[in-house]
Amino acid sequence: MAVKYIQIAADLANKIKHEQYAAGDFLPSEPTLSQLYNVSRETIRKALTELADAGLIQKIQGKGSVVINAARIAFPVSNIESFDELNKQKQMHAATKIIELTDARVPFTISKHLSLTETAATYVKRLRLINHEPIVVDEDYILKKYVPQISPQQAQSSLYHYFEHDLGLEIDYATKTITVEPASASVIKQLQLTNTNLVVVVRSLTYLKDTSFFQYTISQHRPDKFKFVDFAHRKNKNGGLIL
Amino acid sequence: MAVKYIQIAADLANKIKHEQYAAGDFLPSEPTLSQLYNVSRETIRKALTELADAGLIQKIQGKGSVVINAARIAFPVSNIESFDELNKQKQMHAATKIIELTDARVPFTISKHLSLTETAATYVKRLRLINHEPIVVDEDYILKKYVPQISPQQAQSSLYHYFEHDLGLEIDYATKTITVEPASASVIKQLQLTNTNLVVVVRSLTYLKDTSFFQYTISQHRPDKFKFVDFAHRKNKNGGLIL
DNA sequence: CAGTGGTCTAGACCACAAC
DNA sequence: TTGTGGTCTAGACCACTGT
């Protein structure tokens, strides 16, 4: 049996999705929900906080919790999603072509920055295609310390699935930068760029639940196929927590 | 006097910043902090949750809260920051040049999508320069319903400051998309693009605390000057809350 | 005023990590 | 087993929104 507030959040999210609570409606008040689900009010509040963080509702003091217009748009690359997960969600035909799979060391620019002691890694370079069009060139450095071996079969399918389900690694967070940069000749060829030499570069540093650095990824996207969707609450209204 | 858990979070954040708690260290346990600050444990937990959301610590069940390597990188465009706020943080010389300031209506592609009833807006087009280089062309549609008048002086400085401090509007959240698109001839000229005709386009829909739509912004960035930094916890491990 | 969400408490029990 | 964080409760008081 899972945790109550997650169950309640999932239940409410489902009702919002099926428009039992439509956009603009108010949810029942916290005391009411507390009775409905037969839990304490704090538990209801945790559930509602989940929904607010997910952008499904907006809490308004003195009034209630409003369901937000769920007109969200396509292809979110945020929140540490993998190519494979994206693919499932969007029901597109995806394919992966391995370009390289060797041993390597995490680039020095990264390892010095993180003061890594172990830099032995597996390097994987892959071309991602959607509906038979090349979209992304992914390069991964995966620390040997956590994943000693990666087979071509594993690189072919979802590495995340392999890491999480088969190896039991728990990925927790990532820092990501997005820039636009000129591509190398080989990447231009692989992505079949014609009118430009620019690609969108997403660099990710991925960490495990115990805060250890685990993976460095460089994704080079075709600029005409790239879309990043973000939902953000305004912050720093309070005590700061800056930098 | 502000809220306790925010104060505590700010205090801890400060101590982390000044390396009283260094990266890799564990914070005192929750019961210990509870005694130190003379508050209940739930209040401590709220403070720690703030720090975790901000990416300053990582909570590990059974072990404690670790201070995360704060080697975060520059120029975060996330979390609904304004050009002006960015400028202050980074201590660069910024300037704004107004290109256009007229009445207009929110573009139909947006208004139909949000089923707006009121579409009367002020349109502002501005060129942003950093260290005397053109960086961004911003176009804003601001609903007249909330901001009847915008003077050139106000458009020249920070509109956010005007909205929040002078008008008392409370901006709460935004949805944002990032794409790469060919620029118009005028934008190419304004941004002084030479080797490319591509710009990074950030489109934002901004909402107030009462969930009402308030502003639509289109920012066109010089690709060589664009950088987006993101910090994300992995989600969807729990009950879902998908889409 | 009554009803809403926001904060806070003092305790309880559970899940996990380390010894 | 001990100590850690994770969940949950039943109640309290405060701040804000409406009437």
Image (cartoon, coloured by chain):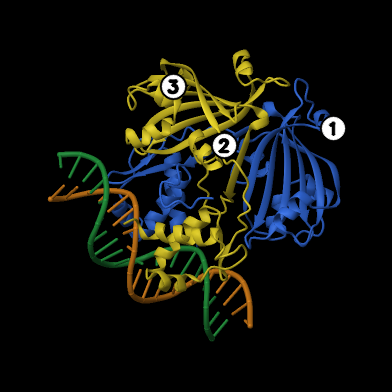
Chain colours: A blue, B yellow, C orange, D green
Circle 3 residue: B112
Instruction: Please tell me the numbered disc located at residue A186.
Output: 1
Residue at x 33%, y 52% (from the top left corner):
A33
Nearest the eye: B129 or A35? B129
Separation (CA) of disc 1 from disc 3: 43 Å
The amino acid marked with disc number 2 is Met
The one of A165 and B170 positioned closer to us in this rendering:
B170
Residue at the (67%, 21%) spot, across then down: B193
Name the residue that disc number 2 marks.
B92
Report helix, strand or loop for mark 2: loop
| Mark 3: amino acid | Lys
Asked where in the image residue C12 lies, by quadrant, the reply is bottom left
Q: Residue A27: tell me if it is visible.
A: yes
Question: CA separation, marks 3 and 2?
Answer: 39 Å
Q: Nearer the viewer, residue B22 or A34?
A: B22
- Gap in angstroms between the C-alphas marked 2 and 1: 37 Å
Q: Which x, y percent locates residue A140?
A: 76, 47
Mark 2 Cα shell of 10 Å, populated few (<14), some (14-19), many (≥20) = few
